[in-house]
Amino acid sequence: MQLGRLLAYFVLGQAALAAAVSLPLRIVTFNIRYATSSLESNEKPWWDLFCFISSSRCRERRLVGLLQSISDAAPAGAVTIMGLQEVLHNQLSDIKNGLGSNWDHVGFGRDDGAESGEYSPILYRTDVLTLVYSEMKWLSPTPDVVSYGWNAGSRRVVTIGVFQDITTGKRFIHADTHLDNVSSEARIEGIKVVVARIEAVQAIYGPLGVTLTGDFNSDPNGDAYSTLQNLGYLTEIWNSGAQRLGTNQLTYTGFTTTGISRIDYIWLGPNPDTFYSAQQFEIWSNIVDGTIVSDHRPIVADITLL
Ligand SMILES: *[C@@H]1O[C@H](CO)[C@@H](O)[C@H](O)[C@H]1NC(C)=O
């Protein structure tokens, strides 16, 4: 009995310690633009043979450098998680090779659940985080199988991971998605699937703090944004009280040097949010050494998992 009590004290003590230690996180969302050969004006190829001669010809080297800079500039001790969109398999390989062997990802190509089509991958560092669980679901009435939903122009997915910080033992859920650019109904119903899947994961592993990254193809007055807002489940970083750094307010730029719209977001919760405090966020430039590396800008948020 005494031993049992001692053990209980020990276990509870460890749990209390884990709960007391907070974990700084750097959350990133970035639509990197799929590698295409039909280039828009000012768009450079992701990679081609001429990139051997001049790396400034291509997006690949500079975009990976930007991701590296975002991670390197994270506050001391912060763990960086990146939710990317429009990532083709070869781009994912290039990014992981560029970032180094500490990085891994969850997610699959949306066209076959394997390597075909765009991924909405979550990139994380295996030396600081353990992956506890992950899933990818289609945003359709049949989320478990490769499918289109609600007149969408493309197959759409959500990637979800439950992560555990190796040092503190703290766990959180991160989800990443890219809503349809054609069908309003697909965006509205799609974001509802995203929340339903997060809640299902939450029911098994939670209650845990949740972060959601994504290209919503919806501005803050638009269909998908208001649907998520009205569900009351998560708060967008912009409305979280976090300080906005820098001057950029728009996230979609096309291959131009000015902003066009705000359609990419970082959300946190669940509400009422006792899991996170949000310090700051910034919409970074997508121009690196004169090259427009994507038609979107990345958003970088610094928050603390309490
Ligand atoms: C939607 O995105 C796809 C793929 O990126 C593109 O081919 C298509 O033109 C876009 N449609 C609209 C309506 O913007």
Image (spheres, rainbow, N blue to C red):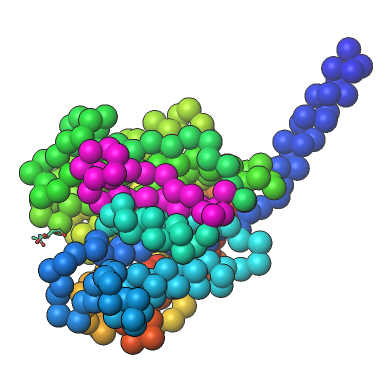
Provide residue 257's location: percent of width, then percent of height: 26, 84
Q: Is residue 306 above or below residue 14?
A: below
- Residue at the extreme left: 151
Q: Name the quadrant containing residue 270.
A: top left
Residue 230 is inside the magenta segment: no
Prevailing secondary structure class for the magenta stretch in the rendered image: loop
Q: Is residue 132 above or below residue 156?
A: above
- Residue at the extreme top: 1
Give me the residue at 43% from left, 37% from top. Answer: 134
Residue 110 is inside the magenta segment: yes
Left or right of 125 in this view: 107: left
Provide residue 263's location: percent of width, then percent of height: 26, 64
Q: Is residue 11 visible?
A: yes
Provide residue 292's location: percent of width, then percent of height: 29, 79
Q: Name the quadrant containing residue 151.
A: top left
Quarter of the figure that contains the N terminus: top right
User: What are the residue bounds of the magenta stretch?
Assistant: 101-126
